[in-house]
Amino acid sequence: MTSTLLSLQGITKRYPGVVANQDVSLSVLSGQAHAVLGENGAGKSTLMKIIYGSVKPDEGQVYFNGQPVHIRNPQEARKLGISMVFQHFSLFDTLTVAENVWLGLDKSLRLSEVTERIVAKASEYGLDLEPERPVHTLSVGEMQRVEIIRALLTEPKLLILDEPTSVLTPQAVEKLFVVLHKLVSQGCSILYISHKLHEIRALCSACTVLRGGKVTGVCDPREETNASLSRLMIGAEPPALAPTPRTPGAVVLSVQSLSLPKQDPFGVDLRGIDLQVRSGEVVGLAGVSGNGQRELMWALSGEDTRAQAQSIVLQQQPTGQLGPQERRRLGLHFVPEERLGRGAVPSMSLAHNLLLTRHEALGRGGWIRIKDLADQAIGIIERFKVKASGPDAAARSLSGGNLQKFIVGREISASPRMLIVSQPTWGVDVGAAAQIRAEILALRDAGCAVLVVSEELDELFEISDRLHVMAKGRLSPSLPRAEATVALMGEWMSGLWPGNTQNTSEALHAQA
């Protein structure tokens, strides 16, 4: 008989105005991959933090290896053999990859030994990492790899993964799943949180469903369908998208021969980028994280103003050297991939976070019209079904998925002429993802030009009219959605598209 490694009995956690977990009981067997499924704000991440010692429960008991334990902090959790990969990363920006990993390991190890272990593990698992790089130079996808490698280096008995594949490419996900299956076969238990139902069905043999902080069901996901899991999670199946072909209008954004040297030693040079986005179309941008997407977003949003003025034209106006505010006046709105820090100020309320991209609530002399801001925030909360205590809730108090819904809603509800959105459904549940994608298509149908950067090919296939791929700072030719396949996109992610002689030779050399 397989023994029970982890058992939760009657776990309850309350916060002001909300009960995150209510009388939750859950058991994980040794050598079992166990999914925890629920919509945004269902209490999944809070429950995982209780197991990892980051949060103290108000009621209930945790048992590990049959013994009652009181895990007071993550250090005690790691001593027991529990490691966790957070949805929101717990990395120090000013330290290197190796130094961040070193913090969670035995201090008797030298930094050089940790560096060697990182290189070995990264190679074994197919997760490319450069140990000497400062974390602030990494993309979100690369930060995710750091978290995963750091957890695996502790040789855990129980590995908690909170949305671990949200910013990984399909190829990287396949490699990660090979590793996870191997860990399970070796006796490691996995607690797996994901909104990607096909991943849960492929990896896990048990599933606990949370809704509103309570356990509402337990099942074997291998015997379920995506539709039945959706019904368990949100009470219904998400509406199917039915995008209709459109004839795009005039060019809203034009990028011509955009080349920019990297701003930090670990960045990517942009080389000869040519891109057009027309009104009434969605252009998707695919690619492995860290291939220049971040640098291109900075150049398009106005965070980087080093480009030639004529290399970026918005609404027929040269904008390469204009800042974000001037570009917003021309109708450009932008959703960055980093929710906290760039997309929202963690300590500020949702209402005040509107001031990051909206200035209509400012009166004469710079006075803020508080009621206008609150009314706008309430409208976004209601329209996008954001679970929050109200417009005064701090951004950091929201779950990752609910904060994502608010930020995307903030920009969509501003009626942009040009919307650039990076990772639009990162970490949101299937119902919310369907709503966000439907809102993007409605914006397109209203005549907006939309550029979507995503590492989820299924998402890009669902909403894009045309597709590009980025590889090593270069942009592939445009490809109509009807001609795009996963296999072809995978080839292009290595730079193997027609006419790209430099990247093609590099990719073939690397394969050899």
Image (cartoon, grey):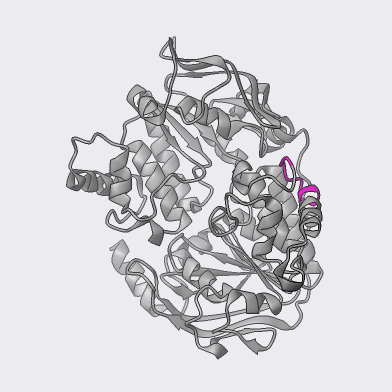
Task: State whether residue 53 is above or below residue 196.
Answer: above
Q: Residue at x 42, y 22 (%)?
A: 31
Q: Residue 232 placed where, x, y %?
A: 71, 30
> Does the magenta portion include 35?
no
Task: State whether residue 376 is above or below residue 296.
Answer: above
Q: Residue at x 50, y 76 (%)?
A: 304
Residue located farthest toward the front when viewing the structure as drawn: 365
Q: Specify the quadrant that holds the C terminus.
A: bottom left
The image quadrant that residue 252 belongs to is bottom right
The image quadrant that residue 57 belongs to is top right
Q: Residue 432 placed where, x, y %?
A: 71, 46
The image quadrant that residue 183 belongs to is top left
Q: Residue at x 36, y 22 (%)?
A: 80
> Does the magenta portion include 385?
yes
Count of picture labels: 0
Given residues 413 and 274, the one toward you in this image is 413
Q: Residue at x 46, y 52 (%)?
A: 171
Residue 228 in the figure: left or right of residue 446: left
Q: Residue 48 placed where, x, y %?
A: 52, 30
The secondary structure that most of the magenta stretch takes on is: loop
Residue segment shown in magenta: 381-389
Q: Specify the quadrant that holds the N terminus.
A: top left
Q: Residue 494 placed where, x, y %?
A: 42, 65
Residue 504 in the figure: left or right of residue 449: left
